[in-house]
Image (cartoon, rainbow, N blue to C red):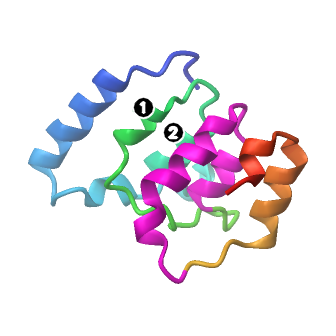
């Protein structure tokens, strides 16, 4: 993982790929089994240097895609170093979460991290 997330570079890469691909479907492509079946949003949410602006570049992703461990990008964000990651993702994707049930594992991960901003959602 990078220790610096450049939102401008990611935004430019996503925009260029979107022009060549079928809209933003490529963002939801999962890696192979050996790499955990993660999407780009899983990896972005797990990056310790992720910022709200960096995550915004992935706003067209499906935040409910599960990886090989059945974790969504929200699970990755909940365990991230910065509480800003989970808070930013919840704010960014709240309209696409209609009917989504927050699972126990996500709540426990947020609570275990110990910052009030993680559990305030």
Q: Is residue 69 visible?
A: yes
Q: Residue furthest left?
A: 19
Residue 65 appears left or right of 17: right
Query: Relative to 89, does residue 47 appear above or below in the rendering?
Result: above
Q: Are marks 1 and 2 in contact (CB under 8 Å)?
A: yes
Is label 2 in a helix, a strand or a loop?
A: helix
* Residue for badge 1: 54
Q: Nearer the viewer, residue 104 or 19?
A: 104
Q: Residue at x 62, y 47 (%)?
A: 86
Q: Residues within 10 Å of mark 1 (few under 14, many from 20)?
A: many
Query: Relative to 120, does residue 96 appear above or below in the rendering?
Result: below
Mark whose residue sits in front, 1 or 2: 1
* Residue for badge 2: 44
Query: Relative to 81, does residue 60 appear above or below in the rendering?
Result: below
Is label 1 in a helix, a strand or a loop?
A: helix
Q: Is residue 31 visible?
A: no
Percent x, y for residue 41?
Answer: 47, 48
Percent x, y for residue 73?
Answer: 57, 54
Q: Main secondary structure of the magenta part?
A: helix
**What separation in Å lies between label 1 and label 2 (alpha carbons)?**
8 Å
Residue 25 appears left or right of 21: right
Q: Is residue 19 magenta?
A: no
Place residue 57 in its image quadrant: top left
Q: Counting residues from the N terminus, which is met first, the one under dot 1 or under dot 2?
A: 2
Percent x, y for residue 37?
Answer: 55, 57
Q: Is residue 75 magenta?
A: yes
Q: Which residues are magenta?
A: 72-99
Which quadrant of the figure contains the C terminus? bottom right
Q: Residue at x 29, y 55 (%)?
A: 26
Residue 81 appears left or right of 52: right
């Amino acid at each position: 993982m990078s220790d610096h997330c450049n939102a401008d570079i990611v935004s430019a890469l996503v925009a260029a790929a979107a022009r060549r691909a079928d809209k933003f479907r490529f963002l939801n492509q999962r890696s192979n089994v050996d790499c955990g079946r993660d999407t780009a949003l899983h990896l972005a949410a797990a990056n310790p240097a992720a910022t709200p602006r960096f995550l915004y570049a992935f706003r067209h992703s499906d935040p409910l895609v599960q990886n090989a461990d059945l974790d969504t990008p929200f699970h990755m964000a909940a365990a991230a170093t910065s509480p800003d990651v989970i808070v930013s993702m919840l704010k960014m994707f709240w309209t696409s979460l209609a009917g989504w049930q927050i699972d126990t594992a996500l709540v426990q991960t947020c609570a275990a991290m110990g910052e009030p901003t993680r559990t305030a959602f």
